[in-house]
Image (cartoon, helix red, strand yellow):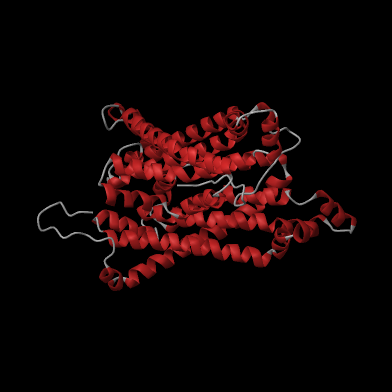
Amino acid sequence: MNFANQVLQWFLNGAHWQGDGGIPHRTFEHLAMSGASVLTAAVIALPVGIAIGHIGRGGILAINISNIGRAIPSFAVLVIAVELFGIGALPAFIALVALAIPPMVTNSYIGMREVDADVREAARGMGMRERAVLLRVELPIALPFIMAGIRTSAVNVVATATLAALVAWGGLGRFIVDGFGLQDYPMMFAGAIMVAILSLIVEFSLAGAQRLATPAGLRPSKTVQKEEPLGTTRDTAMVAA
Amino acid sequence: MLATGVVGAVEDPWIRWSWISGHADIITAALVQHIQLTLIAVVVGLVIAVPLGLVAWRSRVFRGPIFSLTGILYTIPSLALFSALVPFTGFTILTSEIGLVSYTLLILIRNIVVGLNSVPDDVREAARGMGYRPLAELVRIDLPLATQAILAGVRIATVTTIGLVTVTALIGEGGLGSLIYDGLLRDFKTPLVVGTVLSVALAVVADLSLAGAERVITPWSRARATT
């Protein structure tokens, strides 16, 4: 009870809500860094995954890039980035972009392969040009998978951005790492709570976005629920950081 | 990188072989600890996930809460989870394991439920028609047929855990992560490279051996794939 009270007191302390080291600024840093990384990774990864899926070649690469990504510890990626690019925001950004790319490539590829060959044929039979087939048939069907990839990457990035505090960058991880260094456990615990809540908010809002992105005709009905185990070829590439 | 820093500063190479040969004992100890932490996490994870998976499979009422709770645990960043536990369980292996086990649960339970759900209804009908009791049906029909999906879950959980173990270096455990952390703190690349390479190698070896075990344990899946 005493500890809970200390954590509460930490949150109630006005000084923790002001300035560059305050909660609002750290939250902003965390979100800005995560958003920039996910957007940059999306610009790189989605065209690659969609192109591979559309052409239908290079699938082994698209599937395995996630497995390889899973085997490389995010912590190691971050520290290697620091060795290469020095300390601060740049290495954190580069590491986060690198980590966000694999799930997006894999999921957008899987999404494109989900498009039934018959549907594609039918679209061509209706006289659609290749561009129209891609934009009006393939992409809408693939969109929920693409969104799933963005969601996986985003949650992963928000988590790894926390680790970036270890390599002298800001964000909410600062409270954890500084609390740790100063043996200020209420601060450390408060940081952990804020990071956890932020991650859950990102996860739930992107899950909602994914549902909205699913075309009405493709939403799972109550009677037929398609489920695939993780680790199969249809694995939607989950990663934890 | 170019040595453009202080004049006379010795450039730190990515690998200094003399350090490796001089610290073989430390490297071996880190590797062994990494394997131990991973094994404990996956085994304890399975012990918890199997009953929960069975409950989630059988009961629609419990299914939602089980998936929500393990999903929330899975979403919480590792550093946050480990540091939130420290005030209660200290800098111990228990703290590491509570965190690591938490992350295996969603993956394992999800694959157990999906695997069991994939058993065809007529197979189950036939078993009942042959006089199987519920427990015998579960042990001799359902679980063997779900093995492939369950093992796929074990594979992902293992590879994921191997990566996450490195983060526990911050709370004084960490296996190979302690080498990476050491490299970061001392700005010395060799332990960082050794820790990273061994961690990735361990993940690859674990993944391939579990894939091999999957083939041996479920030979029928291979037969089906070739026909």
Inspect this view and state whether residue B64 appears: yes
**A30 left or right of A237?**
left
Residue under the image location 36 percent in, 45 percent down: A95
Q: Position of residue A215 (x, y in %)?
A: 64, 28
The residue lying toward the viewer, choosing from A186 and A45, is A45
Q: Foreground: A12 or B146? A: B146
- Residue A27 in the image: above or below residue B38: above
Q: Residue furthest left?
A: B7
List x then y, in percent, for residue A75: 38, 51
Q: Is residue B69 above or below residue A128?
A: below
Q: Position of residue A125 (x, y in %)?
A: 70, 31
Q: Which residue is drawn at the image coordinates 54% and 44% (left, top)?
A: A52
User: Residue at the spot x=58%, y=49% of the render?
Assistant: B107
Q: Is residue A211 above or below residue A57?
A: above
* Residue A190 figure quarter: top left
The one of A160 and A185 positioned closer to us in this rendering: A160
Please tell me whether residue A123 is drawn above or below residue B3 in the rendered image. Answer: above
Q: Quadrant of the N terminus of chain B?
A: bottom left
Residue A219 visible in the displayed image: no
Judged left or right of residue A228, residue A150 is left
- Nearer to me, B143 or B149: B149
Left or right, B44 with reference to B125? left
In the rendering, at what x and y percent does residue A76 appear? 37, 53
> Which image quadrant: the C terminus of chain B?
bottom right
Numbered marks: total: 0
